[in-house]
Image (cartoon, rainbow, N blue to C red):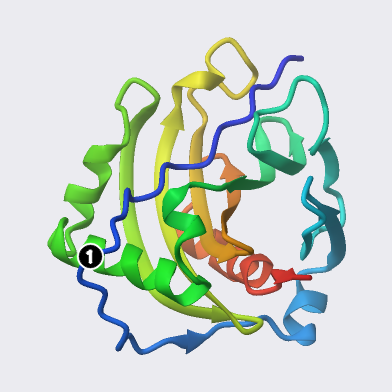
Amino acid sequence: MKILFLIPLLTIVISCNGIDSNINYIDVSSSLKDIQFYELVEESITDDTGVEIILAVPKQASVTRSWGGNSFETNNIAVFNYIKNKSGYAIIVDKLKSKNTANTTNKEYIDIASNEFIINYNGDLNQLKKIFPKTIFKEIEIVDYKGNLIINKKHFAKRIAFYVDARNEGTELENIPLTDFTFITHHNETKYTISIVRYGNYSISDMVGIANTIGGSIRFK
């Protein structure tokens, strides 16, 4: 049966003005004990520039797309998925290189994004959701945004959202609610996003432990 994989949520458009670099960062790197508790296995993927990304994923998950396939999204690196009976996970790894990413360091990029949320969106999650097109992200609710995380010595932002993806219409996932934990970072002049998506009518509490453990396992080489 046809399944359409969602494109990860949009990222705040940033400028390089007014950086506040005095953000208090919190280390949320996953421990080996946490990874073992959720029975995750470590996987390694490599993009077209040779950057290696290592992360822990559910052992049932299989790689369905990886960099270089003719039908893949231009910026997609890999998708790990385990979906059965309209429920399961997808872990989507994407990249984007732009003028903003090329002219900033890892910490500068995340600091700028955090300041944009605070200044341009007044720290209001309801304002932030307005940048997502309603024709695609149906019933979207952004319930959390943190721009002060460190994972394995890299600076990250994280966003949590609920929505129904209109691009799944006509597939077995049509009208299935999604819970999306998106981790955003910067490496080698490029933005990387890792979205951990659960399909089905679940609460954050059903997902927070495993999603944060997957996100907290991300490493770059």
The N terminus: image quadrant: top right
| Closest to the observer, 220 or 167 | 220
Residue 202 lies, in percent from the top left, at 51, 49
Question: How many dots with numbers?
Answer: 1
Q: Quadrant of the C terminus?
A: bottom right
Q: Is residue 166 above or below residue 141?
A: above
Q: Could you tell whether 185 is left or right of 81 in the image?
A: left
Percent x, y of residue 188? 64, 63
> Residue 205, relative to residue 10: is it above or below?
below
Which residue occupies 86% across, 43% down? 62
Q: What type is the residue that disc 1 sits on?
A: Asn
Q: Read off the residue under disc 1.
A: 17
The image quadrant that residue 144 belongs to is bottom left
Q: What is the crowding at mark 1: few (fewer than 14 residues within 10 Å), some, or many (at least 20)?
A: few
Numbered disc 1: secondary structure: loop
Q: Is residue 164 found left or right of 213 in the rendered image?
A: left
Q: Residue 122's x, y, as percent?
A: 12, 62
Viewer-closest of 104 and 113: 104
Question: 110 or 162: which is nearer to us?
Answer: 110
Is residue 47 positioned above or below 133 on the image? below
In the foreground, 185 or 108: 108
Residue 101 against residue 132 in the figure, above or below: below
Residue at image location 28% in from the left, 56% down from the top:
15
The residue lying at 51 percent from left, 55 percent from top is 182
| Relative side of 141 to 4, left or right | left
Determine whether, in the image, residue 76 is placed left or right of residue 201.
right
Q: Position of residue 47 (x, y in %)?
A: 78, 49
